[in-house]
Amino acid sequence: MQWLVERPATTIGVLRRHRFTLRLVVTAERSGRVEVDPDTGRVTAVLRA
């Protein structure tokens, strides 16, 4: 997920082109590391202090 930290907002399509699996994205969402907007496909990293 380091790639996503450097680019805190992206889309599912971009992640797929960079070889992120949908399973990885779903796991990251369930663990609270990212937020996914299913309508737009936008993925945003949840940065914690």
Image (cartoon, helix red, strand yellow):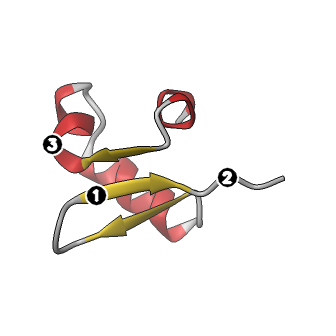
Circle 2 is placed at which residue position? 47
Task: From the viewer's side, name the closer residue of 3 and 21.
Answer: 3
Horizontal and vertical percent for residue 49? 84, 53
Circle 1 is placed at which residue position? 42
Task: Give the secondary structure at mark 2.
Answer: loop
Amino acid at the residue labelled 1: Arg
Horizontal and vertical percent for residue 45? 52, 51
Distance from disc 3 to disc 2, alpha carbons, whole Å, reads 21 Å
Report the residue that reaches farthest toward the right. Answer: 49
Figure quadrant of residue 43? bottom left
Q: Residue at x 57, y 36 (%)?
A: 5
Q: Residue at x 76, y 55 (%)?
A: 48
Distance from disc 1 to disc 3, alpha carbons, whole Å, reads 9 Å
Q: Residue at x 54, y 28 (%)?
A: 6
> Residue 13's mark?
3
Mark 3 is surrounded, within 10 Å at the Cα level, by few (under 14), some (14 to 19) or many (20 or more) other residues, namely few
Distance from disc 2 to disc 1, alpha carbons, whole Å, reads 16 Å
